[in-house]
Image (spheres, coloured by chain):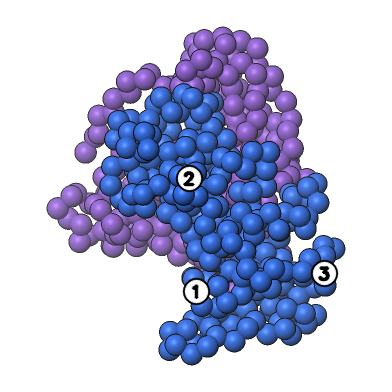
Chain colours: A blue, B purple
């Protein structure tokens, strides 16, 4: 089957499905799968040139999901596909079971209906991981902290930095966030990194925004960032 | 109240008339050219000149235009940025320390006919999205001066605007119905929501720029701090003054008389 692209009618119908699904979930009733007609009908979508491989039943991590999606598209088509919101929304509908743990974990609409602003796209559970993966492909180790967990939700680091354009395009900054908050032994974010206290991602975001007034963060390399981070982050620097 | 600003790092604000950006849009191809006269700022010759071009979508594109001593201004393609609300920021950076020595943010651009264009106005417009059944709305989600990421953009439904929001707003009916209402929404967000707003006449941020614009429409300063109850009336008067001064009301009446 070819990957398809929702038209407005398809997006509206998917939105309605999501609304119903949330109502069912709220009343503890089983949520029905996304209707096959919604995914395949020519009245709600049109085919793209890309072939959909067989979907695994689950993706253990966002990294796995992003890697799967990345294999579907030729590298030189990135500029074209990254803004195809109808296609990303269709992909979320097609992979709905994988990104909702079998329709058990339902998030807000923007997790499934794609938007292009930098405050929206990263919250989409297919486009967000793919975008991060694609742009860090040559060294995926620096974005594990963003994509290490299951594809149904957003971790605290992703919530804090996802909408920060500067980080999303800055390898040095990504490497610092990875070093600060990722525990490679446990394969997850460090203990305490999900809070609001001193040294947490929330505070690091405040720090970046503050120094950005006087420093061009794109011109700062990883080593310099590391030295610039104030003492309140020492707990995570040492850990 | 005047706010005293302390600039420890001596970062210089580059004024807009020292920079000339021309944007040309032909079909899906979008290119810009830039030149800047930085002589009066006396930046070190080795400082780098960068221009960041952003838009309300996922990415910003950075261009390196050489150094202050040896600038390499040229035309560049930015077709990959979709939408109409393109924002240009120019930075002069100390290459050794990464400090910002000079900054010009949210630079006004000139369209091909040499007039000030709408792509980087106080209220950028965007007609590239479907709005799910409504014709227009104001979103607060694009980048603006002083590092803001919540500046307003007027979005017109893609189908209704036929992909060109500025064309859509050329209609006297559309502009008369939408623009004063959009202005009201924005001023209400600035002045009636959240913490009390303190106007800073030197700030280039979108909030201060909007209040400055509203003051030029009414000719009245903002109500004093202890007279917040007057703010809704002040906003109404500013929007009405804008509509009159821009002849939106008259334009609408003339149009329906035809």
Residue A2 shows which numbered tag?
3
Q: Report the chain holding disc 1.
A: A
Disc 3 to disc 2: CB gap under 8 Å = no
Circle 3: element type: strand
Closest to the observer, B137 or B244: B137
Residue plotted at (52% across, 57% down): A149
* Disc nearer the start of the sequence (3/2): 3
Closest to the observer, A161 or B83: A161
Write down the quadrant of residue B111 in the picture: top right
Residue plotted at (48% across, 59% down): A154
Residue A185 shows which numbered tag?
2
Classify residue B113 as left or right of residue B179.
right
Write down the quadrant of residue B256 in the picture: bottom right
* Disc nearer the start of the sequence (1/3): 3
Q: Do the residues at discs 2 and 1 belong to one chain?
A: yes
Classify residue A196 as left or right of residue B254.
left
* Disc nearer the start of the sequence (2/1): 1
Disc 1 to disc 3: CB gap under 8 Å = no
Q: Where residue B48 sits: x, y (%)?
A: 58, 19
Residue projecting furthest to the left: B226
Residue picked out by circle 1: A105
Residue plotted at (57% across, 35% down): A171
Q: Nearer the viewer, mark 1 or mark 3?
A: 1
Q: Report the chain holding disc 2.
A: A
Circle 2: element type: loop
Q: Residues within 10 Å of mark 1 (few under 14, many from 20)?
A: few
Q: Do the residues at discs 3 and 2 belong to one chain?
A: yes
**Is residue B54 something one can see in this rendering?**
no
């Amino acid at each position: 089957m070819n990957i398809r692209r929702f038209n407005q009618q398809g997006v509206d119908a998917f939105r309605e499905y999501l609304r119903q699904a949330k109502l069912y979930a709220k009343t503890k009733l089983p949520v029905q799968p996304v209707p096959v007609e919604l995914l395949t009908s020519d009245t709600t979508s049109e085919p793209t040139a890309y072939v959909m491989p067989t979907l695994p039943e689950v993706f253990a991590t966002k990294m796995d999901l992003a890697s799967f999606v990345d294999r579907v598209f030729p590298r030189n088509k990135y500029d074209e596909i990254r803004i195809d919101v109808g296609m990303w929304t269709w992909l979320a509908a097609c992979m709905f079971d994988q990104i909702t743990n079998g329709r058990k974990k339902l998030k807000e609409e923007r997790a499934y209906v794609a938007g292009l602003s930098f405050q929206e796209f990263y919250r989409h559970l297919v486009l967000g991981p793919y975008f991060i993966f694609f742009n860090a492909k040559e060294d995926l180790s620096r974005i594990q902290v963003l994509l290490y967990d299951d594809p149904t939700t957003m971790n605290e680091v992703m919530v804090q930095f996802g909408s920060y354009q500067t980080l999303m395009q800055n390898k040095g900054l990504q490497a610092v966030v990875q070093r600060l908050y990722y525990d490679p032994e446990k394969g997850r974010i460090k203990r305490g990194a999900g809070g609001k206290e001193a040294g947490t991602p929330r505070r690091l975001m405040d720090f970046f925004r503050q120094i950005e007034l006087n420093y061009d963060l794109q011109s700062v390399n990883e080593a310099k960032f590391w030295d610039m981070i104030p003492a309140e982050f020492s707990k995570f620097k040492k850990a | 109240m005047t706010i005293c600003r302390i600039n420890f790092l001596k970062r210089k604000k580059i004024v807009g008339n020292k920079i000339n950006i021309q944007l040309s849009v032909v079909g899906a191809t979008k290119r810009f050219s830039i030149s800047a006269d930085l002589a009066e700022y006396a930046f070190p010759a080795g400082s780098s000149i960068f221009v960041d071009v952003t838009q309300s979508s996922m990415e910003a594109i950075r261009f390196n235009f050489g150094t202050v001593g040896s600038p390499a201004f040229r035309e560049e393609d930015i077709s990959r940025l979709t939408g109409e609300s393109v924002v240009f920021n120019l930075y002069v950076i100390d290459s050794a320390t990464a400090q910002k020595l000079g900054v010009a943010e949210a630079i006004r651009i000139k369209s091909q006919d040499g007039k000030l264009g709408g792509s980087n106005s106080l209220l950028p417009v965007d007609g590239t999205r479907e709005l799910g059944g409504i014709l227009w709305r104001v979103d607060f989600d694009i980048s603006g001066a002083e590092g803001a990421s919540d500046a307003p953009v007027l979005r017109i439904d893609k189908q209704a605007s036929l992909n060109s929001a500025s064309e859509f707003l050329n209609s006297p009916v559309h502009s008369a119905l939408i623009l004063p209402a959009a202005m009201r929404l924005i001023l209400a967000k600035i002045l009636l929501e959240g913490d009390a707003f303190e106007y800073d006449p030197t700030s280039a941020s979108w909030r201060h720029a909007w209040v400055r614009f509203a003051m030029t429409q009414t000719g009245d300063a903002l109500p004093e701090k202890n007279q917040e109850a007057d703010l809704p009336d002040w906003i109404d008067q500013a929007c009405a003054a804008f509509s009159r001064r821009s002849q939106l009301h008259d334009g609408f009446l003339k149009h329906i008389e035809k």
